[in-house]
Amino acid sequence: MSLLFSYGANYPARLTKTLGHGIETWKAYAPGYERVFRGYSKRWGGGVASLLLNPEAETLGYVTRVTAADLRILDAREEVPTAYLRVEIPVVINQGPTEAWAYIARSPLFYPPTKRYLEAVAATVAAHWDDVSWQDIPVC
């Protein structure tokens, strides 16, 4: 088992449906990374979330335990290695610093996200961080 850091549209109910089983989640953030929107998704009709190194930033989200089989499902859905890469990044959870898998877009091109996509991102963040709405998600 390993950890997966979710910061984009993989809010807990959506990830549960994708994996076909229940998940337990924990509050987490990725220090030194900012959420950006890179690449275009036909499914969402606009830009999708990625992470970009920025020593002055942190990205809020959550972690969950995943198996190798779960990662194969997610790799296929995230179109690894064409659209996204799966990389281990540092994250902080209640117990302290650790590492988790995260999906990072290969495209360097900015595309604005749709309101529907920002609502999904807000649902991911709000799973463990209070008072987050789609308007609170910076678009860059």
Image: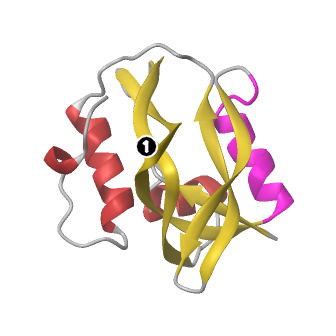
Q: Quadrant of residue 118?
A: top left
Of residue 43 and residue 117, the one placed in the foreground of this image is 117
Q: Quadrant of residue 61?
A: bottom left
Quarter holding the C terminus? top left
Residue topped by disc 1: 34
Give above or below for 135 relative to 78: below
What's the magenta region? 67-81
Residue 91, position as x, y percentages in the image: 59, 64
Looking at the image, which residue sits at the far bottom?
A: 95
Looking at the image, which residue sits at the far front?
A: 56
Residue 46, position as x, y percentages in the image: 35, 21
Residue 34, position as x, y percentages in the image: 43, 43
Q: Is residue 76 magenta?
A: yes
The residue positioned 51% from the left and 57% from the top of the image is: 31
Give above or below for 38 relative to 12: above
Q: Quadrant of residue 45?
A: top left
Of residue 83 and residue 44, the one placed in the foreground of this image is 83
Question: Under tag 1, what secondary structure?
Answer: strand
The residue positioned 39% from the left and 17% from the top of the image is: 110
The residue positioned 31% from the left and 71% from the top of the image is: 129
Going by the numbered disc 1, the residue's amino acid type is Glu
Q: Is residue 41 visible?
A: yes
Q: Relative to 90, is 124 on the left or the right?
A: left
Q: Relative to 99, is 94 on the left or the right?
A: left
Give above or below for 128 relative to 85: below
Q: Relative to 60, is 83 on the left or the right?
A: right
Q: Is residue 29 magenta?
A: no
